Structures are given as C-alpha cells and as structure tokens.
Amino acid sequence: MKKWLKSVSPLMMAVGLISVGVLSGCATPNAGVEIQGEVWFKERMALPPEAMLTVQVKDVSLMDAPAVVIAEIERGDVTTPAPFQFIINRDQFEKGHTYAVGARISLNGQLMFINTQAYKIDLESSEPMSVLVQKVGR
C-alpha cells in the first residue's frame, strides 16, 4: 500500500488542511511557505517497490534535544531523483528558529539511505532543494 502523506498528528493534518484553504482563497502570497526539491542517491540501483521514502521538515533549533517534526511525507515506489513538496502555513515557523529537511529510505523497517549533512531551509527562498541520501553500511 502506498502512503503519500503521513500525518504527524491530527492537529498537524488540520493545520495542513487549513493552510491549503487559506492559500487557495487568499490573495496574500506569503500566507504559506513552499518547500520543494528532490531526494537522490548516487548508487546505480533500482529499489524494491516496498522501499519507503520519508521526507521531514524539522525544527532543529535546540542543540541537546531531538528535532521537532513540523511536517512529513512518506511514499513508496522510490526512484532517484524523488520529488517532494510541502506547503506549510507561515505561522508554523517561529522567528529565530532553524529549520531543516531530512530524508531517509527504508525497506521493511530497515534503514537503507539517510542524509548525512544538514539541509537548512531558507524561508524566504522558493529555490528547490537537492537532498543527497547516503547508503547505510551493513
């Protein structure tokens, strides 16, 4: 079964639906933040259809605490490059905080690929991001 969007919480899903409604019915261009790009890996291989790609937008502001997931997309049938897109209400981002995109590919719960460098989000830019995931050694 393919899952294209995995809700972080029912509240976040409601916020996402409200964001879409606000964006479609509002003339204010900065009511939402669009974060888009692609996840890719260098290995020349086809992944099994059961492989799952997870892309997250995270608040990484606190040094000694786990990142807070703001939004998450999960999908199967992973190819390289794999596009992603988030439209998140600007109110979800706190001034002075740092946000980043994280990506991983797993198969049957086992991690196969993960990003090994930080991909910080520029809230004022609409340029697509290119997120490289590295193969995990076994």
Image: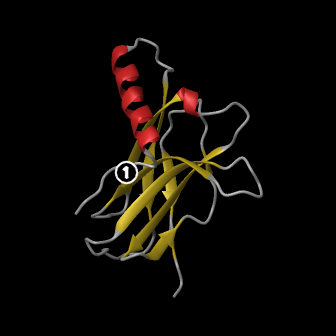
**Residue at 44% of width from left, 33% of height from top?**
15
In the structure shown, which secondary structural element does the residue marked by tag 1 occupy?
strand
Relative to 66, does residue 112 appear above or below in the rendering?
below
Give the quarter of the image for residue 23. Answer: top left
Q: Observer-nearest residue: 58 or 85?
A: 58
Q: Residue furthest left?
A: 1
The amino acid on which the numbered mark 1 sits, given as a three-letter code, is Pro
**Residue at 40% of width from left, 34% of height from top?**
14
**Residue at 47% of width from left, 75% of height from top?**
111
- The image shows a total of numbered marks equal to 1
x, y percent for residue 137: 54, 84
Relative to 61, does residue 34 appear above or below in the rendering?
above
x, y percent for residue 110: 44, 78
Q: How dense is the environment of label 1, judged by Cα within 10 Å: few (below 14), some, or many (20 and up)?
A: some
Q: Observer-nearest residue: 10 or 28?
A: 10
Q: Which residue is mark 1?
A: 83
Relative to 40, does residue 59 appear above or below in the rendering?
above
x, y percent for residue 39: 44, 57
Q: Observer-nearest residue: 97 or 9?
A: 9
x, y percent for residue 17: 36, 32
Q: Residue furthest front?
A: 10
Quarter of the image where the N terminus is located: bottom left
Q: Residue furthest bottom?
A: 138
